[in-house]
Image (spheres, grey):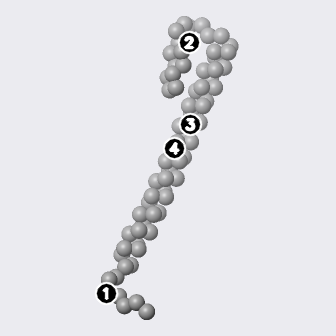
Amino acid sequence: MQFDHLNFNEEDGLMSIEDLRASRLQKNKIESDKKARKYILDINQRYRKMSARKSNNFLRNMNPFKKTA
């Protein structure tokens, strides 16, 4: 039985208990990695949106003809 990082190929139909346990752990690890990447992606998107909004407001509020104190 060969394990790929994302897909595993079964060479035979019968699997030992250790192989079943290893495949289940591998599937759980892949699922948790997917959830973690999605969570990080969501955080990065929110941060980019906030920083873009701050940047746009800064440029909008900056007036070259405005007198400083």
Q: Return the residue at label 1.
A: 65
Which amino acid lies under the numbered mark 3 shown in the image of this protein? Answer: Asp
Q: Secondary structure at mark 2?
A: loop
Which amino acid lies under the numbered mark 1 shown in the image of this protein? Answer: Phe
Q: Secondary structure at mark 4?
A: helix
Residue 60, position as x, y percentages in the image? 36, 75
Q: Quadrant of the C terminus?
A: bottom left
Which amino acid lies under the numbered mark 4 shown in the image of this protein? Answer: Lys
Marks 3 and 2, Cα distance to the nearest angstrom? 23 Å
Residue 21, position as x, y percentages in the image? 66, 20
N-terminal-most mark, 2 or 1: 2
Marks 2 and 1, Cα distance to the nearest angstrom? 72 Å
Residue 51, position as x, y percentages in the image? 45, 63
N-terminal-most mark, 4 or 1: 4
N-terminal-most mark, 3 or 2: 2
In the image: residue 59, left or right of residue 22: left
Residue at image location 55% in from the left, 40% down from the top: 35
In the image: residue 3, left or right of residue 54: right
Q: Nearer the viewer's eye, disc 4 or disc 1?
A: 1
